[in-house]
Image (cartoon, coloured by chain):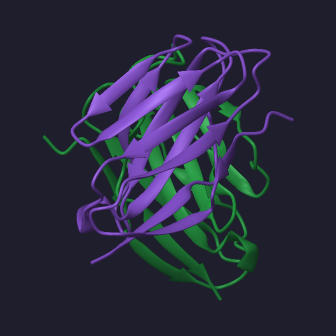
Chain colours: A purple, B green
C-alpha cells in the first residue's frame, strides 16, 4: 500500500508569521508530486507540480521544495495572511500511468 | 466556459435508495475521476475513466457504479445507498494521464444518507 503522509494534520498560525508543513511519500518510486490548496466549501485548486529532485517552485508567498531521494516535500508560506487559511493537500504519483494518491492534508488556520 | 459542473450540489436520500450524481465537463479532457472526501482520509478515489466506455476502479469502489458513454459526462450511481456513503463527492478531470498533469475539480456534491 502506497502511503502519502502529511504533517501536521492541523496548524494555527498568527497572521504575519511564516510556516511550513511536510508531505512524505515513498522514495523508492517517484514520478511527480502535486500540491493543492483547498478552501472550505470550495474545490481543490492546483498550486504546484514538482518532478525533479531539488525542484523549488514559488507562487507569491507560497513556495515548495522537493527531495525525492528521501521522500519528502515542504510547503512554505511566508508572512501568513487570513486568506491563506485552507487545507493543503499533496498528491504523489509513481509512474506516468499511475493514479495520483492524495495525502489527508494539513489544515491551516491563520489567527488575525 | 463552465469547466466542470456537478449536480445536484446537495442531496438527501434514504438508505436503500438509488442515487445518481452527475458530472459534466466542457474541456474534452480524456480522464475523469470521482473522489469522496472523508475526515482523516482526505480524498479517496472511487472510480476513474480514461475515455468514453473505459472505466476502472479506484481505492473505494464498492457500492458504486459508473459509466461514460460520452466524453463529457461521468455519472456516479450509488445502487443502494448506505449511511457510510454520506460524504462530499468531487468529480475531477485531467487532460491526459501523464501523472504530471493537474487535476481540475468540480464544486462537489454533498450527499447525506439517512
Q: Give the quarter of the image for residue A64.
A: top left
Name the residue furthest front. Answer: A17
Could you tell me which residue is drawn at 25 percent across and 43 percent down?
A61
Q: Quadrant of residue A16?
A: bottom left
B77 with respect to B27 (left or right): right
Residue B90 location (% of width, % of height): 48, 54
Q: Position of residue B14 (x, y in %)?
A: 64, 85
Q: Position of residue A94 (x, y in %)?
A: 68, 18
Residue placed most toward the observer, A19 or A1: A19
Up-down relation of residue B59 to residue B64 (above or below): above
Q: Quadrant of the C terminus of chain B?
A: bottom right
For the point 46% across and 40% down, which residue is it? A75
Query: Left of A92 or right of it: where is B94?
Result: left
B114 or A62, which is in the foreground?
A62
Q: Is residue B42 left or right of residue A11?
A: right
Position of residue A35 measured from the top left corner of the image (x, y, whole percent): 46, 37
- Determine whether A43 is above or below B15 in the image: above
**Image quadrant in which you'd find residue A91:** top right
Amino acid at each position: 500500500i502506497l502511503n502519502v503522509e502529511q504533517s501536521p494534520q492541523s496548524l494555527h498560525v498568527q497572521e504575519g508569521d511564516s510556516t511550513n508543513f511536510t508531505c512524505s511519500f515513498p522514495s523508492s518510486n517517484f514520478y511527480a508530486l502535486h500540491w493543492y490548496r483547498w478552501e472550505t466549501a470550495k474545490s481543490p485548486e492546483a498550486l504546484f507540480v514538482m518532478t525533479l529532485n531539488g525542484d523549488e517552485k514559488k507562487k507569491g508567498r507560497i513556495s515548495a521544495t522537493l527531495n525525492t531521494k528521501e521522500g519528502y516535500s515542504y510547503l512554505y508560506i511566508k508572512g501568513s495572511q487570513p486568506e491563506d487559511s485552507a487545507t493543503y493537500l499533496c498528491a504523489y504519483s509513481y509512474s506516468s500511468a499511475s493514479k495520483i494518491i492524495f495525502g489527508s492534508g494539513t489544515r491551516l488556520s491563520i489567527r488575525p | 466556459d463552465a469547466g466542470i459542473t456537478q449536480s445536484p450540489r446537495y442531496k438527501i436520500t434514504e438508505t436503500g435508495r438509488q442515487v445518481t450524481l452527475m458530472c459534466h465537463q466542457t474541456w474534452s479532457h480524456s480522464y475523469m475521476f470521482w473522489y469522496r472526501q472523508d475526515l482523516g482520509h482526505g480524498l479517496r478515489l472511487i472510480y476513474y475513466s480514461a475515455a468514453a466506455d473505459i472505466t476502472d476502479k479506484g481505492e473505494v469502489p464498492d457500492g458504486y457504479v459508473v459509466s461514460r458513454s460520452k466524453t463529457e459526462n461521468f455519472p456516479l450511481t450509488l445502487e443502494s445507498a448506505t449511511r457510510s456513503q454520506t460524504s462530499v463527492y468531487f468529480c475531477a478531470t485531467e487532460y491526459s494521464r501523464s501523472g504530471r498533469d493537474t487535476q481540475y475539480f468540480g464544486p462537489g456534491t454533498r450527499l447525506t444518507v439517512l
